[in-house]
């Protein structure tokens, strides 16, 4: 949103603030090109009003939790699938000509090809979150094809950066605040994944919407991956607790942190690269920058 406003666009935001904060919008509150509505996509009338008159929509609303203990089946169904359906119904017959959707690398499940390309299949998600995102992709593809608007779907690696309030970096920082001498790591610590800095994510979103295709799907991540133990090491150093003892839980299903945790993930970004996007940060840099920001916020 900040980028769109800075570029001179008129921006309307619909958010229930379940995980967001008005502090992030403060600089734009009185701007004539900015409009904020506090509401939920599940409210059909609110969604219809929010969509009215819009040309492009960036759909990032979802419950982002992969762990089942943090979000169950009904929550994923309502906040991800049903919310997306509500938005698509509002778009149908409206002035919207493009929908950009934040999907997830979790739609691939335990991919046997790394880096994983967009045409990899079959797609067999192993988490309810991944399943809900894949369902949203299918709905968006069908609606775009039937009702004449363009859709761009981004399968994202783990996005990190300023304003983070959940995820592994947030969790590790919180654990060190409670006990600067020890850090619990879920799983065997060998889980290895790609991390994408939010600045690179924004650039990718803006580049992808220029594709011109009816339905375009792009992977977006960094060019490498890091292990959970490497993340723990970065966070310990950033938090000033380099000697904190790491305690591994061992995890489930061969070292996963929890049921549904994809152990290895790295994306092939050739498709997005071919239209001019390149990530500026690798995974370790994205982690470090985020850890520094989270540490300063939580002081």
Image (spheres, rainbow, N blue to C red):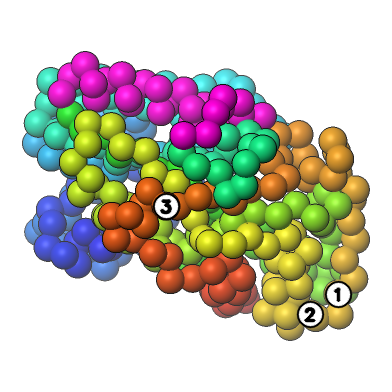
Mark 3 → mark 2, Cα distance in angstroms: 38 Å
Which quadrant would the C terminus be assigned to in this image? Answer: bottom right
Q: Which residue carries the number 2 mark?
A: 241
> Circle 1 — which element?
loop
Q: Which residue is mark 1?
A: 244
Q: CA distance from mark 2 to mark 1?
A: 6 Å
Badge 2 density bin: few <14, some 14–19, many ≥20, Cα 10 Å: some
Query: Dot 3: few (<14), some (14–19), or many (≥20) neighbours within 10 Å?
Result: some
Q: Nearer the viewer, residue 182 or 179?
A: 182
Q: Nearer the viewer, mark 3 or mark 2?
A: 3
**Which residues are drawn in magenta?**
119-148
Q: Residue at x 36, y 57 (%)?
A: 273
Q: Is residue 139 above or below residue 261?
A: above
Residue plotted at (31% across, 19% down): 142
Is label 1 or label 3 in front? 3
**Residue 127 visible in this rendered orientation of the protein:** no
Count of picture labels: 3
In the image, residue 223 sits, relative to residue 188, either above or below, namely below
Majority secondary structure of magenta residues:
helix
**Left or right side of 100 for 63:** right
Q: Residue 138 colored magenta?
A: yes
Q: Is residue 172 magenta?
A: no
């Amino acid at each position: 949103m900040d980028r769109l406003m800075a570029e001179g666009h008129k921006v309307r935001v619909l958010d229930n603030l379940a995980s967001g904060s008005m502090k992030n919008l403060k600089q734009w509150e009185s701007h004539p090109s900015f409009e904020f509505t506090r509401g939920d996509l599940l409210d059909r009338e609110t969604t219809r009003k929010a969509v009215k008159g819009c040309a492009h929509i960036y759909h990032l609303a979802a419950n982002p939790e992969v762990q089942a203990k943090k979000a169950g089946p009904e929550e994923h169904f309502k906040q991800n699938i049903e919310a997306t359906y509500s938005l698509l119904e509002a778009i149908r017959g409206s002035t919207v000509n493009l929908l950009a959707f934040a999907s997830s690398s979790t739609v691939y499940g335990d991919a046997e090809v790394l880096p994983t390309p967009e045409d990899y299949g079959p797609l067999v998600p192993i988490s309810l979150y991944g399943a809900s995102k894949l369902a949203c992709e299918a709905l968006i593809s069908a609606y775009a094809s039937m009702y004449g608007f363009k859709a761009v779907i981004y399968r994202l690696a783990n996005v990190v950066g300023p304003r983070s309030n959940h995820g592994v970096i947030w969790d590790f920082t919180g654990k060190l605040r409670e006990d600067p001498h020890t850090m619990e790591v879920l799983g065997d610590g060998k889980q290895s994944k790609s991390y994408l800095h939010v600045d690179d994510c924004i650039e990718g979103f803006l580049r992808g919407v220029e594709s011109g295709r009816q339905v375009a799907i792009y992977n977006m991540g960094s060019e490498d991956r890091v292990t959970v133990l490497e993340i723990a090491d970065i966070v310990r150093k950033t938090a000033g607790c380099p000697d904190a003892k790491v305690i591994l839980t061992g995890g489930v299903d061969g070292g996963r942190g929890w049921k549904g945790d994809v152990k290895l993930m790295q994306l092939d970004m050739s498709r997005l690269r071919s239209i001019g996007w390149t990530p500026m940060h690798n995974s370790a840099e994205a982690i470090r920058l985020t850890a520094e920001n989270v540490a300063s916020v939580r002081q």
